[in-house]
Image (cartoon, rainbow, N blue to C red):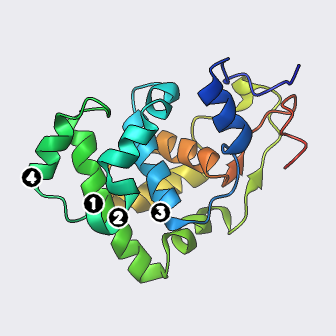
Amino acid sequence: MVKRCDWVTDEPIYIDYHDHEWGRPVHDDRKLFEMLTLEGAQAGLSWITILKRRENYRNAFDNFEPQKISQYGSDKIEKLTNDEGIIRNKLKINSVVTNAQAFLKVQHEFGSFTNYIWQFVDGKPHLNERKNKEDVPSSTKESEAMSKDLKKRGFKFVGPTICYAFMQATGMVNDHTKDCFLYQSR
């Protein structure tokens, strides 16, 4: 029997996400925008709720292409608020458009979003040594700094807890617990 992090359920989609994606470094701007969007959508909900809707989000939000999303107008926003395949919270939907616009500005300023976002961990993943899920914080000084700077740049739904979950998801921090089979492979 393979031992995984305690948060993983027996849901195949969760197992696949944990085993092949979570905690692996991401340096692709579009993928980083996708994960920032999904983590923001998750606020107040479980991650499995978002994970099960991920393909719907990709379809609804033009495969997370910031250039396209930054141009969304009121008709598109209205269409998204009626899309049963995503979380239909108008504040969260509007934040995706706002974040796409801010994302493009960051890309322009730093050459890529990757260059910008990875500075919060000095360009390399933080490899943590967590014994169990209780040892994993909901935020850190790095996620607090990231949140503060993203908010200053106009991003929405980027609180310190969302930023830390984003950091975990994109491999900026590796929080596989010591008893997880992926802990050794980092």
Are the two marked residues, 2 and 1, in contact with CB atoms closer than 8 angstroms?
yes
Per the image, the residue denoted by label 4 is 74
Q: Is residue 72 left or right of residue 164?
A: left
| N-terminal-most mark, 3 or 2 | 3
Per the image, the residue denoted by label 1 is 69
Please report the residue visible at 51 percent of the width from the left and 30 percent of the height from the top. 47
Query: Which amino acid is tagged 1?
Result: Ile
Using the numbered discs, state the Cα–Cα distance from disc 3 to disc 4 in whole angstroms: 23 Å
Using the numbered discs, state the Cα–Cα distance from disc 4 to disc 2 in whole angstroms: 17 Å
Q: Is residue 111 left or right of residue 94?
A: right
Please report the residue visible at 39 percent of the width from the left and 56 percent of the height from the top. 64
The residue positioned farthest toward the left in the image shown: 75
Using the numbered discs, state the Cα–Cα distance from disc 4 to disc 1 in whole angstroms: 12 Å
| N-terminal-most mark, 3 or 1 | 3
**Callout 3 environment at 10 Å: few (<14), some (14 to 19), or many (20+)?**
some
Using the numbered discs, state the Cα–Cα distance from disc 3 to disc 2 in whole angstroms: 7 Å
Query: Which amino acid is tagged 2?
Result: Pro
Please report the residue visible at 73 percent of the width from the left and 64 percent of the height from the top. 124
Query: Which amino acid is tagged 3?
Result: Arg
Quadrant of the image occupied by residue 11: top right
Q: Nearer the viewer, residue 134 or 8?
A: 8
| N-terminal-most mark, 4 or 1 | 1
